Image: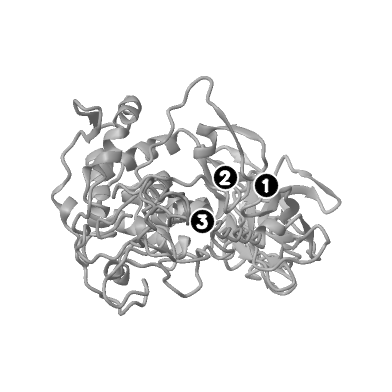
Amino acid sequence: MAAHFGRLRKGATTTAVAAVAVAALSASQAPGVTTDNLGRQAAGAQPSADANTGGEGGGATGDSPYYTDLPPLKSPNPSPSASPATGTPVSVGEAEAGIPATVLDAYKKAEAELRASKPGCNLPWQLLAAIGKVESGQARGGRVDASGTTYSPILGPKLDGNGFALIADTDNGAYDGDPAYDRAVGPMQFIPSTWEWAGRDGNGDGKKDPNNVYDAALAAGHYLCRFDRDLSVQSQMNAAILNYNNSTAYLNTVLSWLEYYRKGTHEVPDGTGTLPSNSSDSHPGASPSPSTPATSTPSTPSTPGTSKPGTPKPGSGGSTSPTPKPPAPSSPAPSPTPPTPTQTVDHLEDANTGKLTATAGSAFGAKVAVRAESKASKGVAKVRVRFTIIGDTDATFTGGESVATVVTGSTGTATAPALVAGEKTGDFTVRATVVGRVLGGLDYTATVTPRQADTLTRTSDTALTCVPGGEFADQVEVKATYKGAVAGKVTATATLIKSADDATENDKGPYFKDADGKTIRTLTDLTTDADGVLKLPKLYADDATGTFLLRVNTTGGAVLTVELKVAAAAS
């Protein structure tokens, strides 16, 4: 478990056992990591001064126990094992690289939020995954519901000073259910006193829940990024990890998983992640466990050879024979874990999505809607559906994101946030997939059309006149509207044409000048401003006299013809 202050018990035994594996991994570790003469990883740079400083509330986990399992050493012929999701043989390395879908989504969303709010921190989501692995085994293999909350609380042992740090209750049991002593809580194992100020709402439900992987991952990201750290600098990353749990062995374990995940991971269904087994307090599986306190005492097995002899039988000459024992009652078979709603989904169906078309810069009138259904075509509620915008487009969902995750309602329907078109025109795709299941998704084509105008008018009625060889005193200015509303950012073209019936470019009369001062009689790629106004460059006249025409047209079909007169000055 991470994120606490004073160190509890250190996993000396498991760390020593893993020394050879760490040594083998060390060659591929991030810059600044070396190994000592026992083959253990050691931080190449000394932690910064804040490494042992908890700041407000101390370390995140109170230095609670953590899982010490190390990532597998990849070999050319890894031993196969069966995937819990599909039964298909996969290598040990492949299984360990799998991260439950919702948990992985939480890490990546936290990275994205930190990239926007604290870009100088350079937080990689793989660091959150590494900490989540050693703290809770990725939320106990991804046993979370559609909102990212664990099905049962993940609690560390009582921090009562009995082999662990002494941290008296700070939350009246609100987070950990213990009114006497604090315990680390949730997938990222925050102690209540730290969560009180470090907690975040990562899934937008208005709550800061340490048992929710979205909230916990975002809180961990902000915690690691404190003190204006830049985690791309190895010494600062080391300091951040030690600040989370003040143990060199912990640092080495996290760095091992960080490097492993950086080499490649994949998404696995929720609830099928690989569970670790070794804890830093020397008791297998004694790190955070769901609901059951980690300090419960196992039953003591009977010792062979200590049973009492039976009572001598009459006439047996005093010899004794063992008294037969009644057969031990058989333990009831554990009830099978019911499938999660996500695991019952068989496919996605369209839920009457309308035509997805919008003009550049405006909102789409229709929204993408899908329905998660079982094999019996019944709607499945409480399932996370991910909507992703794909293609060369600057369109986004409301809020500026290109990915949105929505939980299905009671009928199994999930509706994506409204789409907002950018300035890029053309087609793009919105893909809907189920989070936590490897199922075919649904693709929707959305189209962004250019901005348009249906009317052009001059902003002035002043006659446009000029003498031969001179320049027009007034510049042509027009205003574009569409269905009576201002048509801003509409593309337009202006051409000096031969006649009302011949829209080809004229070869005499008024003209514009290009950047080099050369004569030009057609202007392209013009754009109206936010108020729909377009002001053309200054016009000049050659020696030809008479009435000439300037034609302006826009996307959407708006056309305006303007008269230009060139005549000698009156004597």
Of mark 3 and mark 2, the one earlier in the sequence is 2
Contact between labelled residues 3 and 1, with CB atoms less than 8 Å apart: no
The residue that mark 3 highlights is: 325
Disc 3 marks a residue whose amino acid type is Lys
Residue at image location 33% in from the left, 58% down from the top? 222
Crowding near the residue tagged with mark 1, few <14, some 14–19, many ≥20 C-alpha atoms within 10 Å: some
Give x and y (percent) for residue 164.
22, 59
Contact between labelled residues 1 and 2, with CB atoms less than 8 Å apart: yes
**Most foreground residue, 392 or 13:** 13
The residue that mark 2 highlights is: 267
The residue that mark 1 highlights is: 438
Q: Is residue 196 left or right of residue 499?
A: left
Task: Quote the CA–CA distance across marks 2 and 1.
Answer: 9 Å
Task: Quote the CA–CA distance across marks 1 and 3.
Answer: 52 Å
Disc 1 marks a residue whose amino acid type is Val
Q: Judge whether 514 appears above or below 395 on screen.
A: above
- Mark 3 secondary-structure assignment: loop
Q: Judge whether 515 appears above or below 431 on screen.
A: above
Residue 339 figure quarter:
bottom right
Comparing labels 1 and 3, the label whose residue is closer to the camera: 3
Question: Could you tell me which quadrant the N terminus lies in?
Answer: bottom left
